[in-house]
Amino acid sequence: MKSACIIIFFSLLCIGIGIAFACPLLNWALISPKTYTAAVIAFFCLHIINLIIKKILKRVKRNKETKKLLSSTLIALAMICANADSPRYPEIKELVSRNFLYAQYEEEVQMARKALKAGKAPYINFYTYTAVKGDTIFTLSARCAVTQETLATINGIENSSAVLEGKKLILPTVPGLYIPLQPSTQIEFLIAKGNSVKILSESYPEYEINGKKYYFLMNERFSPEERAFFLDSGMGLPLERYILTSSFGMRKSPISGKWKFHKGIDMAAPTGTPVMACKGGTVQYVGRNDYVYGNYIIIKHDGDITSKYAHLSDIKVSAGQAVSKGTVIGKVGTTGLATGPHLHFEIQLKGEAENPQKYLNK
C-alpha cells in the first residue's frame, strides 16, 4: 500500500510538471510548475495528516471537543500551506538603539554600504516599520541611513511633504531606486520614463513587494528633475506675467451679462504666452474645441487636488503624461467663450471649486 502511494505521488508530480513545461501557453490555467509541485506536495501532506487523524480517532474517545480540536488543527495547517509563499518581513517597533531588530537592521545597512564601496554585491533584506507622529521622509532617511529615494520609491511616497503617520513602511537594507513595472503615481511615471533606457538595455533584478513588482536599480539616485519634483510640494503661478481681469466668486458674465458664479480666475496675457503647470502631477484630461472652455487641460495633483487651464491656443501635453511644476503645458489663447486672450485657471479640491489665489505662492 505504501509503495503504491509513493508511485502514484511521483507519477502525478512528474506528469504535472512535464505538462506545465511542455505547454507554456496553457500552463495549467496559469499555474506554474513550481506552484503545481507545491500543490501536489501540500495535497499529499494533508492526506497523510488526515490518515493520522483517523488513526488517532480510533484510539481516543470520540467526543465533540476532540473532533473540534483536530478540525481546527487541520484548518490551521492548511492556512499555513496556503500562505507559505507570502513574505514575512521582520517588524521594527521603534527606531531606537535598544530595539534588537533596529540594531540588526542598522548593522545590515552598514554591511551593504561596505560591500558597495568594495564593488561587491550586497545582501538585500527588508524590514517593516509603522510610522508615528513626527516621522517624515527626512527623519526616516537619517535614522535608517538609506537615501530618501530608496524609502520613497519602495513605499509609493509621492512627495517630501506626504503624511506618513500610521503608514506601514518597507525599510530596505540596500540603497537604490525601486521602479514599478506598472507606475501609478506622478513620481513613479517620471522615474520610469527617466530610467526606461537603462531598464531596457540592462538586466535588473525584480522584486515583488506587497503585491507590486519593481525593478531595482541598485545605488541609483533621483535625477535633478526628479528630485525637484519630489521636494516641491508648493503651488506656483501658471503665468510669469499677467493681469488679473476676473476674480473667483460671483461676477457679471462678460458674455451673457448675467450674474454667475466664476469657478476660477481670469489671467490676461498676450496670445501665445507659455502656460505652466502650477504643481507636479499627471495630466488627467485634454479637451479640445469645447464650447465654453475651448482647448483646455486638467492636471491631477496629490491630495485630491486638480487644476484646470482653459481657452488655450495650443496644447503641449497629452493625457496620462506626468508633469512637474513649471512644465510648459500650453499657450494662452481665445478658444471657447473668451472676449480676449487670457487664461481661465481653476483649482478644485475633491471636486469642489476653490479660490486659486489661496493656493498660489505669493
Image (cartoon, rainbow, N blue to C red):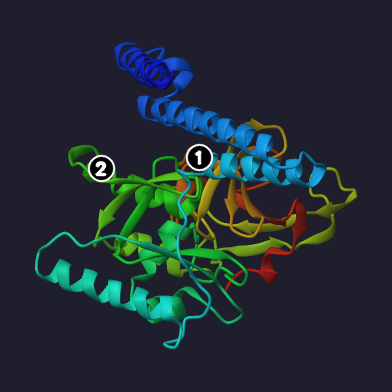
Res. 272 in view: no
Residue placed under numbered mark 1 in the picture? 320
- Looking at the picture, tell me which residue is in the foreground, 15 or 257: 15
Image vertical order of residue 49 relative to residue 249, above or below: above
The tag on residue 206 is none
Res. 199 mark:
2
Circles 1 and 2, Cβ within 8 Å, touching? The answer is no
Q: Position of residue 201 (x, y in %)?
A: 18, 39
Residue at disc 1, secondary structure: loop
Most foreground residue, 317 or 191 = 191
Expressed as whole percent of the image width and height from the top left, the position of residue 80 reads 54, 45
**x, y percentage for residue 220?**
25, 60
Q: Quadrant of residue 104?
A: bottom left
Give whichever of 101, 80 is nearer the camera: 80
Q: Residue at x 61, y 34 (%)?
A: 55
Q: Is residue 6 left or right of residue 93?
A: left
| Label 1, label 2: how far apart the Cα atoms are | 21 Å
Q: Secondary structure at mark 2?
A: helix
Above or below, 360 against 28 in this view is below
Where does the image place residue 135, in percent across and percent down from the top left? 54, 78
Q: Residue at x 36, y 74 (%)?
A: 105
Q: Amino acid at mark 1?
A: Gly
Q: Quadrant of the C terminus?
A: bottom right
Q: How many numbered marks have been drawn onto this rendered protein structure?
A: 2
Image point (61%, 64%), residue name:
243
Residue farthest toward the bottom in the current orientation of the protein: 98
* In the image, farthest residue toward the front: 59
Q: Residue at x 28, y 48 (%)?
A: 195
Mark 1 vs 2, N-terminal side: 2
Amino acid tagged 2: Ile
Looking at the image, residue 90 sits to the left or right of residue 46; the answer is left
